[in-house]
Image: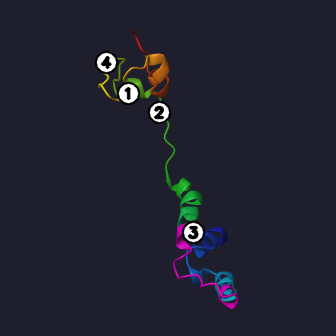
Amino acid sequence: MASAAILVSSATLIGTSTNLLVSWVMTQFGVPPIGMFELTSIGIPKLMLFIGQRLIPIRTTEEPLTDKYNLRPFLAKLSIVPGSTLDGSTHEESHIGQDFDLVVWR
């Protein structure tokens, strides 16, 4: 419970007295004070990272997804459009097989 309170408190200026103190000290040094929701961009992602992971269920599959969704290997023809970045290069030079995990046949 205490950990959740610490995480939530970092989302707004009035979440903790430390946030208020730091904002006041900033004004003493001529720096603009912290806005009310300026810390939200830091606090909410932290909250999602630590608590959100526990909300997502862990799913396990008994069978491979390729079998579950009836995915089979297939053959496709790729045509290179003249003037494209791949125009004039070999498939070894373009790395298209490596980049997209493809087996390239000639």
Crowd band around label 1 with a 10 angstrom C-alpha radius: few (<14), some (14–19), many (20+) = few
Badge 3 vs badge 4, beta-carbon distance below 8 Å = no
Q: Secondary structure at mark 4?
A: loop
- Which residue is the site of mark 2? 61
Residue 13's quadrant in the figure? bottom right
Residue found at x 48% / y 17%: 92
Kind of residue at disc 4: Ala
Badge 1 vs badge 4, beta-carbon distance below 8 Å = no
The answer to whether 23 is drawn above or below residue 51 in the figure is: below
Q: Does the magenta segment cover residue 43?
A: no
For the residues marked 4 and 2, what is the alpha-carbon distance in whole angstroms? 29 Å
Q: Earlier in the sequence, mark 4 or mark 2?
A: 2
Crowd band around label 3 with a 10 angstrom C-alpha radius: few (<14), some (14–19), many (20+) = some
- Which residue is the site of mark 4? 76
Residue found at x 33% / y 24%: 70
Badge 1 vs badge 2, beta-carbon distance below 8 Å = yes
- Which residue is the site of mark 1? 68
Kind of residue at disc 3: Gly
- Taking the image as shown, residue 13 lies to the left or right of residue 79, namely right
Q: Secondary structure at mark 1?
A: helix
Q: Position of residue 55 (x, y in %)?
A: 51, 55
> Is the magenta region chiefly helix, strand or loop?
loop
Tell me the magenta residue range.
26-41
Nearest to the eye among marks 3 and 1: give it.
Answer: 3
- Which residue is the site of mark 3? 43
Q: Does the magenta segment cover residue 39?
A: yes
Crowd band around label 2 with a 10 angstrom C-alpha radius: few (<14), some (14–19), many (20+) = few
Kind of residue at disc 2: Thr
| Residue furthest out toward the top | 106
For the residues marked 2 and 3, what is the alpha-carbon distance in whole angstroms? 34 Å
Q: Secondary structure at mark 3?
A: helix
Nearest to the eye among marks 3 and 4: give it.
Answer: 4
